[in-house]
């Protein structure tokens, strides 16, 4: 058996973290001939999403026992990160909700990838595998 395959990569917690740019990742999107730009989520947008998830949970004995309103949290996040190129405005939530489910979900998966958002029930490979399906 290959010992290197079993090695776990460790990170030196004291190693400096250097980011050369604070520019957000952007992805050009075209839907039915209309140009949009998907931008990486900022801290405010992700915090709003996380707060929506937490506010929709009812806890008992330290565990979630009921969840409500969670279906829209990622769509709301998408509406905070998708810009209509022609007018420079964010795409309204109502417009995004009218798009086909498969397209909306592809955009959400791509947004999560470029923003580094990975939920407990999915991983990076799940997100990458979902695109275009």
Image (cartoon, rainbow, N blue to C red):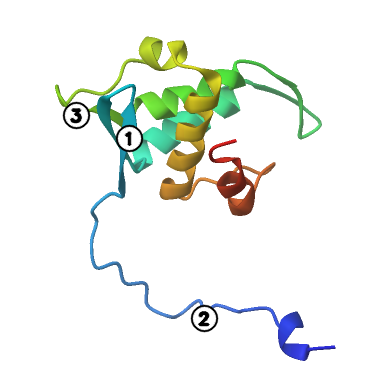
Q: Position of residue 30 (x, y in %)?
A: 31, 31
- Secondary structure beneath label 3: loop
- Name the residue carrying label 1: 29
- Characterize the local packing of mark 1: few (<14), some (14-19) or many (20 or more) Cα atoms within 10 angstroms: some
Q: Is residue 97 left or right of residue 85?
A: right
In depth, the one of 28 and 108 nearer the eye is 28
The residue positioned 28% from the left and 24% from the top of the image is: 33
At which x and y percent is residue 75?
A: 47, 23
Q: Which residue is mark 2?
A: 12
Q: Compute the Cα span from label 1 to label 3.
A: 10 Å
Q: Eyeballing the image, is 37 above or below 15? A: above
Front residue (pair 36, 61): 36
Which residue is at the front of the view, 1 or 41?
1
Q: Which one is earlier in the sequence, the residue at label 1 or at label 2?
A: 2
Q: Are marks 1 and 2 in contact (CB under 8 Å)?
A: no
Residue drawn at the location 24% of the way across and 68% of the way down = 20
């Amino acid at each position: 058996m290959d010992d290197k395959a079993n090695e776990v990569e460790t990170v030196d917690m004291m190693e400096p973290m250097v980011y050369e740019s604070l520019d957000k990742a952007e992805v050009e999107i075209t839907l039915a001939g209309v140009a949009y730009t998907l931008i990486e989520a900022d801290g405010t947008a992700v915090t709003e999403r996380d707060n929506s998830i937490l506010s929709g949970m009812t806890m008992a004995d330290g565990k979630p026992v009921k969840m409500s309103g969670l279906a829209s949290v990622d769509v709301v996040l998408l509406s905070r990160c998708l810009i209509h190129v022609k007018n420079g405005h964010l795409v309204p939530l109502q417009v995004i909700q009218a798009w086909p489910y498969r397209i909306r979900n592809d955009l959400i998966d791509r947004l999560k990838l470029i923003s580094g958002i990975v939920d407990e029930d999915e991983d990076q490979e799940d997100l990458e595998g979902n695109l275009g399906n």
